[in-house]
Image (cartoon, rainbow, N blue to C red):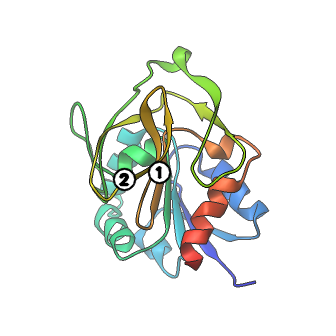
Amino acid sequence: MVSRLVGVLALQGDFREHRHALEELGCDVREVRTDADLQDLTAIVIPGGESLVIGRLSHLFGLLEPLADLIRSGLPTLGTCAGMIYLARSVTEGTQYQLGVLDVVVERNAWGRQNESFETDIYIEGLDEPHHGVFIRGPWVEELGEDVEVLSRWDGHPVMIKQGNILATSFHPELTNDRRLHKMLLEIEES
């Protein structure tokens, strides 16, 4: 088996859960906090958390441009919840630091506040069985670029998308025992 060094952006949020999921799949995992941590990665995960905080810290630590350049160059990338927001071109309201590598506009906290978070089974293109979606103040995709493929919808809104080397979800696959979406990231690497 080819050794994989997968980065997990570890500025804030549930990066530990992603690390655990990737290690279960046999990956070597590096927590990314500086641009030096980006060296030699074969894939990266942008975790859920607070997208405003992740963006601001990325800016302060000089990660915005190097990370965006690396993703644009083809690094397989998975963004979950706040990670989807951080990857997106823009948000529906306000401004924040974003990578702008995913041609979508997202609505933050689309289903409401923390107490309106929910879990449900969702169907994802390419998977035989439903995936249990954990939506915690999750975003949804409001506008799609022409090269963005919708892999799953919930309540009529895109909640999992793919654009080239980038996968993004509105929900938190790392909070379940289902590793199929992390495997999808690794399959991008192999293609």
Badge number at residue 136: none
Name which of mark 2 and mark 1 comes first in the sequence. Answer: 2
Query: SS at mark 2?
Result: helix
Res. 147 image quadrant: bottom left
Q: Quadrant of residue 177?
A: top right
Could you tell me which quadrant the N terminus lies in? Answer: bottom right
Q: Identify the residue position indicated by label 2 in the image.
A: 87
In the rendered image, the vertical position of residue 128 relative to residue 77, given as above or below: above
Task: Using residue 163 as the reference point, say whether residue 81 is left or right of it.
Answer: right
SS at badge 1:
strand
Up/down of 191 relative to 161, above or below: below
User: What residue is disc 1 on?
Assistant: 168
User: Is disc 1 surrounded by few (<14), some (14 to 19) or many (20+) residues within 10 Å?
Assistant: many
Q: Going 61% across and 69% down the picture, which residue do you hit?
A: 186
Is 68 in front, or is 156? Answer: 156
Q: Amino acid at mark 2?
A: Leu
Residue lying farthest left? Answer: 94
Q: Which residue is farthest top?
A: 115
Percent coordinates x, y for residue 6 in the rendering = 59, 70
On the image, the x and y values in percent for residue 30 come to 60, 68
Residue positioned 35% across, 63% down in the render = 63
